[in-house]
Structures are given as structure tokens and as C-alpha cells.
Image: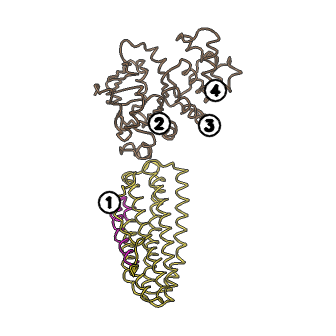
């Protein structure tokens, strides 16, 4: 829609493209950071985790760049209609991606702690959850760059699987902790890791909503299935 | 096209239906066509102008927005080769009926032009002339009062009250334009048509006129043609976009500038027209 035809002032198009490039770069970095954080956790690789922690600064720097760029576009170009939505959406998405970066960094920090404890079981579920969420980040960035609201909608629907995995992981971790109190330290960290991954999934869903707004100028109707039962989950309560 | 049910005030933008229904229609126009000789300048324009609102007409040069504006008080009558077809009603009365007194119509539907055009007379006489010839006021006291009130409403009183007998042409451009607005107000019109009233003014004078337009809305219905989309966005409640003689889209101003429904509107307001 946006790229159908160019603006009379070609510098305006350059500015808009620049926004897309920044979001693409930032999103790519965040996806990579998240993948590395999960990999470090699964492989108990403290060194990789440290690298993830340090690299978060790059995402923050790009966010600042997006902020400045959008503010100057609002002031100098006074974008209207779909152009305005492009600028506003970039501003919003950048802040969401920055949050995704923070969560990945937190996963990496906990990984550093976890590597100092004996290994516990559920890394397969974590890896699977991480895979789904990484796919969501990847797809939603494509949806943004291609202005594809349907693809974004698809990402929104995938969040259900993440919620279900989160609930099952939660039960699994509670069980481990009850079986062996020595695993509590690692499992407590893993509970937060699971929550972080789940939150990243939510953020990918938020980006999907912003993409929908970008394309249609309205927010999607909230008919998204939700399946996160972890807040209600009790294991062994009947004893 | 000409025989549309008058109770149907809503058109083009359905989402505004509920808000539109509550407003009083001032001008009801349907199937408006204007020809300059052989050339057709407007095609079947259906548009309602609501009371105590500012309606902005936007579009590229030659799109027909000024032509449409001028049909509302029959300013097109002054052009020999110009023909107007369709239904144009002011408060339910056909503006183009033979029974209409055009001079009286133009007192009800005043006009402010692009270039300030005060009479080559004193500031006082610029205002007093209209009410005097329309017989709205006779006595000196009464006319004094109209002059003062009109200048106050046009936010010019404080600047000129001590020099009312100086020539109107001696004022600055922005002041002259406000004088012209005061002159239009003086004959107690119901509607004020403005054809790019700020295009010859600097940004400060423009801001004062825009502020004035917003104040005038309480008492008058205003239709403004403007080349500045920012101005349309700032001053109007509804915006109508014209292109190549067609009314492409009309709707609540906020909606037109954020989520226009027609691609041509989108292209125009985002600066992609080529």
C-alpha cells in the first residue's frame, strides 16, 4: 500500500524507508539475541549468555535512533494518513522490540546463574517454546516490512501455543521442585525464563496488532484465543 | 441524482451517520453540475453543509472546489458562460429559483476572498456600507453599534478603534482580511464562504484568522476553500476532497486526515499526487 507510488518530495520516501530499515535492523538483532539467549540456556553456555547481555546495548541505541528519526519526521514532514501511521507504528514497534531485547538479556543473566547449578530436566520444552516465539518474531517483522496484516494475524494466533507451553512448563517445574529441593534454585530461575519467553510472545503479538493498525488504520478485534493457565496452576495441592 | 430524499442527511461516510443525524443541515446540495461553456467543471456533487460547523473544501488546483463554493451564493451568475445544474437548497429553499433575490441571498451567504479587498473608503465606511444599503440599520447610533460589534467579532476592534476614519486600504494584509470578515459579518449573514482567505497572509496573520474562524463558528456556518491541508485540518470539523470535478470523499476532518477511505484522498493529503 505504502510503496504503490512515491511522494512528490522524494526525501520523504527516503525518510520513510530509513524507518523501515531501522526497524528491520533492530528486529533482526532482537531475534538474534533471543535465539542466542535460548541457545545459551539449552547448551548451558555461560560465555554466549555474557555476549547476549553485552549486545543489548546495540538494540537500545537503535531505538534511540528511531525515536529521534520519528520526532524529526513529525516536526519536519507533518505526515498524514498512512504516512502518519507508518511513523507512529515505527515508534511503537521500536519500543516493543526494545522490551524484547530486555527480556532476552534477562534470560541470559539467569542462564549465567543456572549454569552454576546442577542441570535440571525441562530444557526440551524451553527450547520448543523458544522456537515458536523466535518464529513469531521473525514472521511479525516480515509482516511489518511487507505491510501484510494477514501474516500479522497469523502471528497473533500462534501465541496460543506459547501460552499452552508456558502452562505445561510451569507444571513441570513445580513438579521438579517438589521432587528435589536441590533443583529449586535452577527451577526458580527457569520459571522466570519461561515467563520471559511468554512475555516476548505477547510482545510479538503486540507488534502484530501494530502492523494491523498500520495497514487498516484500526485495531484488530480482540477475538484471539488465550490459553495461559499458569496463573491458576497448582501442582500437588490436593495432598 | 437531483431527487434525493431530503431526510437523508448522511452520505459518503457511513461511520459518521450518528453524529451527522444530530446536526442541522444549512446547505443541501445534490447532483450539482457546473459548466463553463462546453467544459464541465463539476460532476454530480452531493454535499451537505451543516450549521455552525466549518466545512473545508480541499483538492488540487482546478478540482472544482472554488466552483462549488461559488454556486452556494450564486457568484457564478456573474460569469456569462457558466451554467449550474442540480439541487442547491439553503434551509430547504432552492437557491437558483427565479423567486430568489440574489442580493438578499448574498447578504445571507457572505463571502471573503483570497486577496483582501476593502473598499477604498474609511475603515468605518467599509463596515457601515452593507448594513446601510440592506436597510439593516439606519440611525447613526445603530450603525456605530454594528461597526463596533462587527469589528469586535472579527478581532480587529482593539487595533483600529482609534482610527476608524482612516482608509481601510492602509491596514496590513492580515488586518485588511479581518476587515473584510468584519464587513461580511456586518450584514448579519448566516453562512460565510471563504475562498483561500489566508493565502496572501503571513503565518501570524493566518493564525489570527484561523482563531477567528473557530470563534465565528458559534454564530455562523462557514465553508472554506483552502490549499493548505494543515489549515483544513486545523480549522474545520468536516472536510470534503474534490478531484477533477468530482467530490471524492467527505467526512469528519479527523477521519479524513488519518484514515481516508479513498486512495485518491490518501494520495493527495500525503503528498503523492503526480
Q: Quadrant for the N terminus of chain B, please.
A: top left
Mark 2 and mark 4 on one chain:
yes
Say which residue appears at 48% left-offset and 78% top-offset: A107
> Is label 4 in a helix, a strand or a loop?
loop
| Horizontal and vertical percent position of residue B4 | 29, 27
Q: Nearer the viewer, residue B170 or B143?
A: B143
User: Which contiguous range is marked in magenta?
Assistant: A142-170
Spatial CA distance of label 3 from label 4 is 14 Å
Spatial CA distance of label 3 from label 2 is 22 Å
Q: Are marks 1 and 2 in contact (CB under 8 Å)?
A: no
Label 4 sits on residue: B156
Label 3 sits on residue: B204
Sort mark 1 into few (<14), some (14-19) or many (20+) by Cα contacts within 10 Å: some
- Of the residues under marks 3 and 2, which one precedes in the sequence? 3
Mark 3 and mark 2 on one chain:
yes
Q: Which chain hosts label 1?
A: A
Q: Nearer the viewer, mark 3 or mark 4?
A: 4
| Horizontal and vertical percent position of residue B188 | 53, 19
Label 1 sits on residue: A150
Spatial CA distance of label 3 from label 1 is 47 Å
Against B96, is A132 above or below?
below
Chain B shade in the render: brown
- Of the residues under marks 2 and 4, which one precedes in the sequence? 4
Q: Nearer the viewer, mark 2 or mark 4?
A: 2
Amino acid at each position: 500500500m505504502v510503496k504503490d507510488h512515491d511522494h512528490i518530495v522524494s526525501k520523504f520516501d527516503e525518510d520513510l524507508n530509513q524507518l523501515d530499515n531501522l526497524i528491520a535492523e533492530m528486529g533482526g538483532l532482537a531475534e538474534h539475541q533471543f535465539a542466542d539467549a535460548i541457545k545459551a540456556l539449552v547448551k548451558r553456555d555461560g560465555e554466549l549468555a555474557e555476549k547476549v547481555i553485552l549486545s543489548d546495548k546495540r538494540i537500545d541505541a537503535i531505538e534511540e535512533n528511531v525515536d529521534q528519526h520519528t520526532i524529526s519526521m513529525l516536526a519536519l514532514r507533518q505526515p498524514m494518513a498512512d504516512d502518519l501511521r507508518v511513523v507512529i507504528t515505527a515508534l511503537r514497534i521500536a519500543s516493543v522490540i526494545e522490551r524484547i531485547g530486555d527480556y532476552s538479556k534477562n534470560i541470559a543473566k539467569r542462564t549465567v546463574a543456572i549454569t552454576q547449578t546442577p542441570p535440571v530436566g525441562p530444557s526440551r520444552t524451553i527450547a520448543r517454546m523458544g522456537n515458536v516465539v523466535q518464529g513469531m518474531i521473525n514472521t511479525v517483522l516480515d509482516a511489518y516490512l511487507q505491510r501484510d496484516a494477514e501474516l500479522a494475524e497469523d502471528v497473533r494466533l500462534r501465541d496460543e501455543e506459547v501460552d499452552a507451553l508456558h502452562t505445561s512448563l510451569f507444571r513441570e517445574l513445580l513438579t521438579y521442585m517438589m521432587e528435589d529441593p536441590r533443583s529449586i534454585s535452577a527451577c526458580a530461575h527457569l520459571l522466570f525464563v519461561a515467563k520471559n519467553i511468554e512475555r516476548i510472545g505477547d510482545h510479538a503479538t503486540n507488534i502484530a496488532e501494530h502492523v494491523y493498525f498500520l495497514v487498516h488504520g484500526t485495531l484488530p478485534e480482540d477475538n484471539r484465543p488465550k490459553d495461559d493457565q499458569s496463573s491458576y496452576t497448582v501442582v500437588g495441592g490436593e495432598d | 441524482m437531483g431527487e434525493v430524499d431530503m431526510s437523508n442527511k448522511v452520505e459518503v461516510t457511513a461511520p459518521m451517520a450518528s453524529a451527522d443525524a444530530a446536526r442541522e443541515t444549512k446547505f443541501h446540495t445534490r447532483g450539482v453540475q457546473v459548466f463553463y461553456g462546453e467544459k464541465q467543471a463539476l460532476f454530480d456533487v452531493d454535499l451537505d453543509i451543516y450549521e455552525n460547523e466549518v466545512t473545508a473544501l480541499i483538492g488540487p488546483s482546478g478540482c472544482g472546489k472554488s466552483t462549488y463554493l461559488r454556486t452556494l451564493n450564486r457568484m457564478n451568475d456573474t460569469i456569462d458562460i457558466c451554467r449550474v445544474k442540480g439541487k442547491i437548497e439553503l434551509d430547504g429553499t432552492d437557491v437558483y429559483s427565479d423567486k430568489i433575490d440574489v442580493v438578499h441571498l448574498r447578504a445571507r451567504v457572505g463571502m471573503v476572498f483570497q486577496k483582501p479587498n476593502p473598499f477604498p473608503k474609511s475603515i468605518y465606511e467599509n463596515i457601515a456600507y452593507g448594513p446601510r444599503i440592506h436597510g439593516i440599520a439606519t440611525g447613526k447610533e445603530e450603525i456605530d453599534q454594528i461597526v463596533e460589534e462587527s469589528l469586535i467579532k472579527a478581532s480587529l476592534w482593539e487595533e483600529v478603534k482609534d482610527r476608524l476614519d482612516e482608509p481601510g486600504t492602509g491596514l496590513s494584509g492580515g488586518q485588511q482580511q479581518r476587515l473584510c470578515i468584519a464587513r461580511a459579518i456586518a450584514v448579519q449573514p448566516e453562512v460565510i464562504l471563504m475562498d483561500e482567505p489566508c493565502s496572501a497572509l503571513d503565518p501570524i496573520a493566518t493564525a489570527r484568522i484561523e482563531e477567528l474562524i473557530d470563534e465565528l463558528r458559534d454564530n455562523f456556518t462557514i465553508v472554506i476553500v483552502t490549499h493548505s491541508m494543515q489549515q483544513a485540518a486545523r480549522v474545520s470539523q468536516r472536510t470534503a476532497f474534490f478531484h477533477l470535478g468530482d467530490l471524492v470523499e467527505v467526512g469528519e476532518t479527523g477521519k479524513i486526515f488519518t484514515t481516508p477511505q479513498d486512495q485518491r484522498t490518501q494520495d493527495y493529503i500525503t503528498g503523492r499526487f503526480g
